[in-house]
Image (cartoon, rainbow, N blue to C red):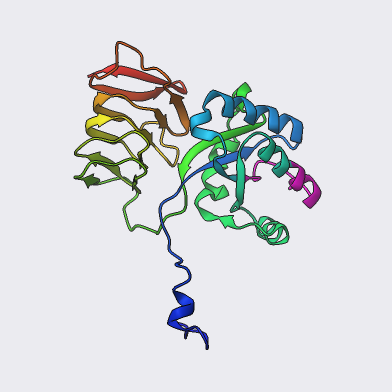
């Protein structure tokens, strides 16, 4: 452990704390180097779900652009992201050139969104709506958790998740024994089970697992998402409001069914 710098008195250190925490963040995968096309694609998504994306912090992933744009072009892309209503806070970790670019631009690299996670998808044709950019809801970088390749257990949360709180199950399912309040968030790399009222936001399959599902005893959610595919509820469908439901992804569309 490095020594504390000389002159760093307790009085000075009381001026601020520096801590790691769980922060919800989204990933913008840039698929088109045209700033106008990027802005148009993102504006559609922001307008579809303003409660989720308006002024949301985002990580910008340039790994789908070959070759990597020069500094001026990247500045134009970042301006397009800002103009759409999103706030870029860093670049997704990629090649060494991305590291150098981030240093020149004075932006951090966010290792959670490493390009290795996307290699398989590069070989797959994108939907027409994804030709310019894709916004994916996902949690920010978290401390490493030692787990096997497949989830073998679930994180059990035995208290209600209150407004403003966020619970993230990294590498496993999440079980909430209680309610999830309006303005609260629950996230999991696997499935989410809520044995109570789900009134806030639920993000399952946070690292892209399309087989993940959301189960709840009383459905009143604001937003649900599986593997980045989301749905915002200004008004709940009458047949599902207050009922026990499961939510799954089928052909890249969210499906809700009664339990």
Find out whether residue 62 is within the magenta segment.
Answer: yes
Q: Quadrant of the N terminus?
A: bottom left
Q: Quadrant of residue 242?
A: top left
Q: Which residue lies furthest to the bottom in this view?
A: 6
When the figure is inspected, residue 64 is found, relative to residue 232, above or below; the finding is below
Where is residue 117 shown, x and y percent of the image?
Answer: 51, 45
Depth check, front residue: 23 or 131: 23
Where is residue 41 shown, x and y percent of the image?
Answer: 65, 28
Q: Residue furthest top?
A: 239
Where is residue 91 shown, x and y percent of the image?
Answer: 62, 51
Find out whether residue 155 is within the magenta segment.
Answer: no
- In the visual, does 98 lie left or right of 67? left
Q: Quadrant of the C terminus?
A: top left
State the residue at coordinates (47%, 49%): 140
Range covered by the magenta-colored residues: 60-76
State the residue at coordinates (33%, 24%): 247
- In the visual, does 26 lie left or right of 161? right
Depth check, front residue: 198 or 28: 198
When the figure is inspected, residue 169 is found, relative to residue 4, above or below; the finding is above
């Amino acid at each position: 452990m490095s020594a504390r710098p000389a002159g760093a008195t307790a009085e000075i250190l009381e001026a601020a704390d520096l801590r790691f925490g769980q922060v919800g963040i989204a990933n913008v995968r840039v698929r088109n180097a045209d700033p106008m096309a990027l802005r148009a694609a993102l504006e559609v998504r922001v307008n579809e779900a303003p409660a989720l994306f308006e002024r949301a912090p985002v990580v910008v992933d340039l790994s789908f652009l070959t070759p990597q744009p020069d500094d001026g072009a990247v500045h134009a892309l970042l301006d397009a992201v800002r103009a759409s209503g999103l706030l870029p806070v860093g670049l997704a970790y990629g090649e060494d050139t991305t590291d150098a670019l981030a240093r020149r631009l004075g932006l951090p690299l966010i290792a959670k969104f490493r390009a290795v996670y996307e290699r398989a998808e590069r070989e797959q044709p994108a939907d027409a709506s994804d030709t310019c950019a894709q916004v994916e809801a996902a949690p920010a970088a978290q401390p490493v958790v030692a787990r096997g390749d497949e989830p073998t257990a679930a994180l059990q949360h035995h208290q209600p998740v209150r407004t403003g709180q966020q619970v993230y199950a990294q590498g496993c399912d999440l079980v909430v024994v209680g309610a999830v309040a309006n303005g609260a968030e629950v996230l999991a790399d696997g499935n989410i089970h809520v044995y109570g009222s789900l009134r806030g936001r639920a993000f399952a399959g946070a690292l892209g697992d399309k087989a993940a599902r959301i189960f709840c005893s009383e459905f009143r959610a604001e937003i649900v998402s599986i593997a980045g595919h989301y749905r915002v509820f200004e008004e709940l469908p009458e047949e599902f409001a207050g009922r026990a439901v499961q939510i799954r992804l089928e052909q890249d569309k969210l499906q809700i069914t009664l339990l």
